[in-house]
Image (tube, rainbow, N blue to C red):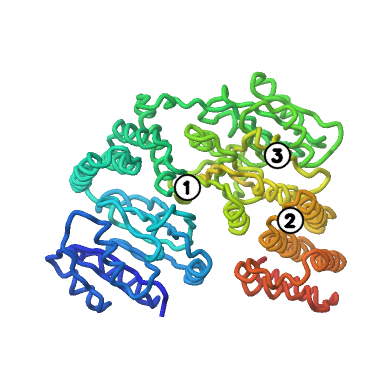
Amino acid sequence: MSKISVCSIVKNEEKNIEKMLESLKKYGFEIVIVDTGSTDRTKEIAGRYTDKVFDFEWCDDFAKAKNFAASKAKNDWILFMDADEWIEFIDLEEMEYFIRKYQNAVGSVFMDNITGTPDNPGPPARIHIERLYDRRKFHYIKPIHEMLAPKYGKLMDNLQLQTVLGHSGYCMDDETRKRKSKRNLELLFKELEEDPDNPYLFFQIGKGYQMIDDHENAVRYFEKGLSYHPDEELDYVHHMHIAYEDELAQLKAMGSSGAGDDANGRIPKISVVIPCYNVENEIDRCLESVVNQTVGLSNLEIICVDDKSTDGTLDRLLQWEQRYQENIMIIQCEENRGLGAVRNTALEYASGDYLMFLDSDDWLEFDAIKKLTDPLSTCEYDMVVGKYIRDTYDKADPKQLTDAEKSTGESRAMLIDSDDKRALFIYLQPITNSACYRLIRHSFLTENDLLFPEGVAYEDTAWGLLVALHIEKLFVLEEIIYHYYIREGSIVLQKNASYHSDMLKLQMNKLGILKETGDWDRYREVLTFEHIRSCYLSFLKVLALRYDDPPYDLFVQLKEHINENIPDCRNNRYIAEGLNDFQKALLDLLYVSVDRDTFIKVAESIRVHGGI
């Protein structure tokens, strides 16, 4: 039997509740239903799935009703669901791990909100919302738009789970939407009279106006809420920043500046760095996607560094420079130096407040930089990271996505201001190690001396970890803004290239840097896990997939490096919890004798498995 009780408060939900209960029944959860006055068959349907159906006299207070429901549960860990929601995906092992390891945290789940009207439903809009908690430590507060809060002290971590709920409650006709919003606003303004300096109430009032497309009032109340500088760690504050930016954009599209003095967007200067080598067939598409950015060329400085190309790349670049002399700078290398050195060279010339690294065979969505700079209107983030898509599109024009195709979830801000948060950040790896599809504060790189390794391939794999050890303010944009072009002959895909061994050299050097800086001792346990993931497992994958005849001598070097620096790492708690069975089996190779024939069989199993 699960350690989790699913609780729900309901009223007249006979059309919805069975779908929710059907989605739950196979998981073994205790189900607690609290009815607040149904006059239809809601309680009858609920009684088919659980014997824990209770009545609660409605008092215009959702928090009281939810806390009553939690009090009737057998288990201390509560997952709250509404009757118009259902399970789309759930990772029970992850939930159990969360309960064991993060007892002072609240778990957020993804929610796919179906919008539009019943006759014309729109695509799901994904958000994340706090739903899993320990009732001994947390409870609901606020009569309407209730929120989880600690019973004692300050709310600590909020961790994202991979569970996904579907929700149909926002799919309603305009009349119903206006009626519901009006009812909610009346209750919220009544509560505001009693608590006039509560930023959460201003957030919810703004959401109420947003629901009925009253953009000016939505901006006004979001702005008022943000003026109190609420704790950035609270989940609703992340939502308020995003909603505020969305409403400002709506006002701008309508020709109004709204309430904010920054509504027209004081966009920081962006240096777009494009290393170029033998891309005469792709560079036009790349640059077209940059010069046509919706933020306008006046905000951009485009630095193209030709790494001694042997085809017509340089000629193409010089033609672009001639067309855009005020915005495009061409730097010519006297010898081929590799991606890391080229990026470092560009940094010497860059004058922008923020940097964007763009590979010369890739391209951007036309609104990519606008989407990345929007969060900077409310906070000077160290980094704003978007999402990318792998693309084989080989036409001359930069293919673009529809709005529905771009969305990958709900964007969020992250504050990494303690050793515990940093260790968790390194372990969960919410962003990739790549330098692309993001904006990076220029001074953040220079202040922390975060240059790229030179003379080796796979330079991002080490650089990304060093970034993770310094970053504090991060914004994750859940939207595809970057097309990563998969082309024959690219560095990472070439078979049997000598530079694939650079990954091992790079990881060895990275470990040396960590020990010199003291970070290895400070975060030893999680960095041990990270090194197994980024060095041992990743290099095994390269050996298996990037060579026709996987080199046994490199495997021996890899094994010696791991055994010398992190002997018997199987007892590491992150490794025990964070690796799957196949990865753990590969880890066992460190502690047994492996001859060449056995190694070849292991490489073949990695190919069959599809990687690691």
Q: Which residue is drawn at 79% across and 62% down?
A: 547
SS at mark 2 in the image: helix
Where in the figure is residue 334, as x and y percent of width and height? 86, 31
| Apparent side of residue 305 relative to residue 75 in the rendered image (left or right) | right
Q: Which residue is drawn at 76% across and 48% down?
A: 517
How crowded pointer 3 is (Cα within 10 Å; few <14, some 14-19, many 20+) is rated as: few
Where in the figure is residue 98, as x and y percent of width and height? 50, 66
Q: Which of marks 3 and 1 is nearer the N terminus?
A: 1
| Amino acid type, residue under disc 3 in the picture | Asn
**Which of 392 and 410 lies nearest the eye of the viewer?**
410
**Which residue is label 1 attached to?**
233
| Apparent side of residue 159 relative to residue 88 in the rendered image (left or right) | right
| Amino acid type, residue under disc 1 in the picture | Glu
Cα distance between the residues tagged 1 and 2: 27 Å
Q: Which residue is drawn at 62% across and 56% down?
A: 423
Q: Which of marks 2 and 3 is nearer the N terminus?
A: 3
| Amino acid type, residue under disc 2 in the picture | Trp
SS at mark 1 in the image: loop
- As displayed, is residue 137 above or below residue 491? below
**Which of 576 and 553 lies nearest the eye of the viewer?**
576
**Which residue is label 2 attached to?**
520
Which label is found at residue 448?
3
Where in the figure is residue 288, as x and y percent of width and height? 60, 32
- As displayed, is residue 563 above or below residue 261? below
Which label is found at residue 304?
none
Cα distance between the residues tagged 2 and 3: 17 Å
Q: Which residue appears farthest toward the front when viewing the image?
A: 152
Q: Quadrant of residue 272?
A: top right
Q: Which of marks 1 and 2 is nearer the N terminus?
A: 1
Quadrant that contains the N terminus = bottom left
